[in-house]
Image: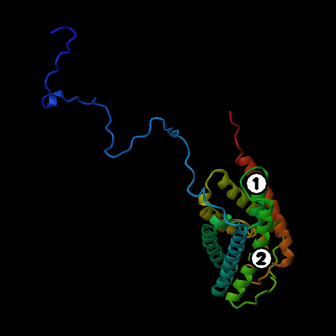
Amino acid sequence: MTAAEPVAAPAAGPATAADTPRPAPDTPRPAPDTPRPAPDTPRPAPDTPRPAPDATLPRAPLVARAAAEAVGTAGLVAVVVGSGIQATGLTDDVALQLLANSTATVFGLGVLIVLLGPVSGAHFNPAVTLAEWWTARRGGAGVTAREAAVYVPSQIVGAIAGAVLADAMFGEPLVKWSTHDRSGGNLWLGEVVATAGLILLILGLGRTDRLRFAPAAVASYIGAAYWFTSSTSFANPAVTIGRAFTDTFAGIAPASVPGFVGMQLIGTAVGLALVAVVFMRGRTA
């Protein structure tokens, strides 16, 4: 044998446990059927936010949103007026009448927001629509001028229809101007407070990404404002106009409507100012 001659390898025999290499103790074992990622496949960063479940859903057509605003406002006024008629027919106690009226409004408004919020945002209120338009105009989320121009008339028509519907259900004259005078500086102040608080609540929920609580929060606020404001918290120009068409517990005399609507618009401006101050956005470093 020379140095150039290959040395014969030993005959291969059956492998024994002693000859089998063992993995390192801390080496993770792959799942049996789990495919391994390609070496060059990029992985998402740990803190990458995932899109919201509804982020890819198409927005409803404007006609559908307008219909939702009309139906929602009609339903709201029907609840307010109808429960007022029912309450006055059951008791002469004004406190119980207001309790029944406010309780029905809380539940009715909450249901309407849950049902129609995904379609139109469930404004049911020109003050809210104008506040949303102003927010969008300043670069935030909201509605365009064209959308606002469609929403507001829809809300007013819906409010009138809701009052007429409630009167029809209880055998009242379909249209009878209210004789319930609601004028006076204290009532106007109550409308400013009620509307400003409502705008602060709704836009504040949006600024803090908590709009999912809007059905309960908005309905609860309106129910509370029935009692802590002198005006029983109309806080809504469309509802105010609609309630002038019924001479029942929830009505408002047509002569009182301009004062209430004017104070509600002032309350809207106050609410926007409060949102700008309370939810002021901090500067990035």
Q: Quadrant of the C terminus?
A: top right
Q: Position of residue 150 (x, y in %)?
A: 78, 68
From the image, tell me which residue sits under label 2: 157
For the residue pair 8 and 35, the one nearer the viewer reads as 8
As measured in the structure, the alpha-carbon distance from the residue carrying label 1 to the one carrying label 2 is: 25 Å
Q: Position of residue 276 (x, y in %)?
A: 75, 49
Give the side of residue 236 with respect to residue 37, left or right. right
Rate crowding at label 2 as few (under 14), some (14 to 19) or many (20 or more) other CA atoms within 10 Å.
some
For the residue pair 73 and 19, the one nearer the viewer reads as 19
Image height check: is 42 above or below 214? above
Give the side of residue 238 with respect to residue 9, left or right. right
Q: Which mark is residue 245?
A: none
Q: Position of residue 44 (x, y in %)?
A: 52, 40
Q: Secondary structure at mark 1?
A: helix
Quarter of image, res 14: top left
Q: Position of residue 225 (x, y in %)?
A: 69, 66
Whether residue 17 is visible: yes
Q: Quadrant of the N terminus?
A: top left
Q: Amino acid at mark 2?
A: Val
**Residue at x 82%, y 79% (from the top left corner):** 253
For the residue pair 245 and 17, the one nearer the viewer reads as 17
Rate crowding at label 1 as few (under 14), some (14 to 19) or many (20 or more) other CA atoms within 10 Å.
some
Q: Secondary structure at mark 2?
A: helix
Q: Which mark is residue 136?
A: 1
Give the side of residue 25 with respect to residue 186, left or right. left
Q: Amino acid at mark 1?
A: Ala
Quarter of image, res 83: bottom right
**Residue at x 68%, y 66% (from the top left corner):** 120
Nearest to N terminus: mark 1 or mark 2: 1
Whether residue 93 is visible: no
